[in-house]
Amino acid sequence: MKKLFLCVVAMVMAVGCSNGPAELVDESEGFALLQRDATTLEATYRSGGASVRMLVVETSSNVVEVTYDFGDPVIGFHIDYNQGVGKFMPTGSALDAAQSQLINHQLEGISNTVPEQGQRTRIEDAAVRQTSFMQIVPVGELLSPYEFVSARGWVHISCTCGSQNIGGYTRQAGRGCTCTGGSGQGCKGRCGQGCGITSTPACVGTTAYTQDCAKHDYGLGTFEAASDDYSFASNNCSCTGVGTCY
């Protein structure tokens, strides 16, 4: 596993795992899709001298390696959909605020590139889900590796905004830009990007609404506890489309 992860990281850095020449790196600003085929999706986002390079590779049927290379740190995921097991594998320094902001733009670029939900390939779905998860990875905190398991389960919540049980707590949660619970962004409980009261972002990420994602939104649960929800939970709520609150 360690050898495979290092190989994937090397691919992200355009070094490769062979003796062949390194590929040319796209240095343009903004989002760039470098490769997209049946088993690989590679993309970068660059802004102001900072960049993130994402590589998603389906190494065998329903087993996917995902890496986000900021130079330092490099954050990797190993996701085995057959076994329902995932691994979070960070290396290097803590994620900083500028790097975290790159992820928001990277997710927008990916979401504008891949098909709508229900039409995505395994690697496209993994790219959207894990990039959505990267939005909640803590900033300024040295990260440790851990494993998450789908068998531990998740609990979907209602799509309709209202007072709900989110696992021992009662809070407002559900779809809608005004479903803020009194503070922060709307769409509380969504395993993905929230939405603001005055803004109408594109419908990106997942439309899975769960208790653990709601608890994280309210600071009542950890990002680790929401890992399996982001990676494995089914999309129980529909999306009303681009340019609308959802």
Image: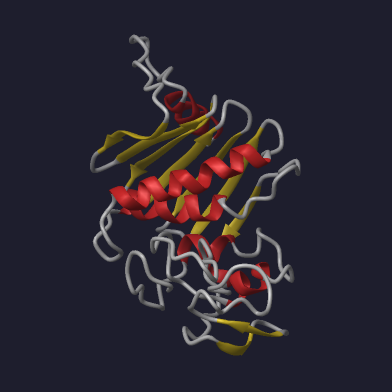
- In this rendering, the answer to whether 74 lies above or below 66 is above
Query: Which image quadrant: the C terminus?
Result: bottom left
* Image spot of residue 135 (x, y percent): 57, 52
Towards the viewer: 182 or 164: 182
* Image spot of residue 150 (x, y percent): 52, 66
Q: Is residue 62 visible?
A: no
Query: In the current view of this chain or complex, which residue is farthest to the bottom?
Result: 163
**Which residue is depicted at the point 43% across and 64% down?**
206
Towards the viewer: 78 or 107: 107
**Which residue is depicted at the point 44% across and 65% down?**
200
In the rendered view, does 211 fall on the left or right side of 47? Answer: right
In the rendered view, does 195 fall on the left or right side of 81? Answer: right
Q: How is the image coloured?
A: secondary structure
- In this rendering, the answer to whether 121 lies above or below 169 is above
Towards the viewer: 141 or 65: 141
- In this rendering, the answer to whether 211 lies above or below 137 is below
- In this rendering, the answer to whether 219 lies above or below 56 is below
**Which residue is depicted at the point 38% across and 36% down?**
43
Picture mark count: 0
**Which residue is depicted at the point 66% across and 58% down?**
224
* Image spot of residue 144 (x, y percent): 71, 44
Q: Is residue 186 visible?
A: yes
* Image spot of residue 92 (x, y percent): 68, 30
Q: Quadrant of residue 39?
A: top left
